[in-house]
Amino acid sequence: MSNSIVVLQARTSSSRLPAKVLLPIRGIPLVVLAAKRAGNTGRKVIVVTSKEYSDDELVATLASHQIEYFRGDLNNVLKRVVDAISDYDDETLVFRLTADNV
């Protein structure tokens, strides 16, 4: 499925439950579980997060699980997603998911 991609939004700066995406479910961080479930479709998965230091632990977790990620603007999610997929053809189907909703 080279003409489609899953973009998984994640950040750790939630005000209601900070670092929610890193909380474990049966020992697996939520973001990792979400990425693996999204990837079981055969589509490429990219986790998009911010460049802020608050997301450094998230990026380290993704890297340790060999999950591709992109870092962009914290406050402008649309820009973050658009920047993450800028190298893809305009005909590429983009499935946007959130990492806190497995």
Image: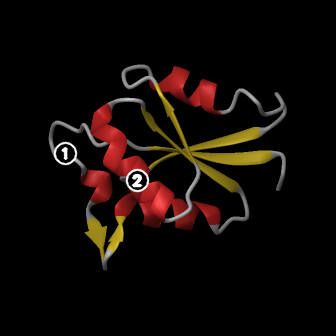
Count of picture labels: 2
Tell me the colour scheme of the image.
Answer: secondary structure
| Distance from the alpha carbon under mark 1 to that under mark 2 | 17 Å
Q: Which residue is depicted at the point 31% across and 79% down?
A: 26
Q: Which residue is depicted at the point 34% across and 40% down?
A: 55
On the image, the x and y values in percent for residue 3 come to 83, 46
Local crowd size for mark 2, using a 10 Å CA cut-off: few (<14), some (14–19), many (≥20): few
**What amino acid type is highlighted by mark number 1?**
Pro
Left or right position of 69 against 30: right
Q: Is residue 61 above or below residue 97?
A: below
Q: Nearer the viewer, mark 1 or mark 2?
A: 2
Quarter holding residue 33: bottom left
Q: Which residue is depicted at the point 46% across and 26% down?
A: 77
**What amino acid type is highlighted by mark number 2?**
Ala
On the image, the x and y values in percent for residue 79 come to 54, 20
Mark identifier at residue 18: 1
Circle 1: element type = loop
Left or right position of 24 against 15: right
Mark identifier at residue 61: none
Local crowd size for mark 1, using a 10 Å CA cut-off: few (<14), some (14–19), many (≥20): few
Lower position in the chain sequence, tag 1 or tag 2: 1
Quadrant where the N terminus sits is bottom right
Q: Is residue 45 above or below residue 27?
A: above
Towards the viewer: 15 or 61? 61
Quarter holding residue 18: top left
On the image, the x and y values in percent for residue 42 come to 73, 64
Mark identifier at residue 60: 2
Q: Is residue 56 above or below residue 83?
A: below
Circle 2: element type = helix
Towards the viewer: 67 or 97? 67
Quadrant where the C terminus sits is bottom left
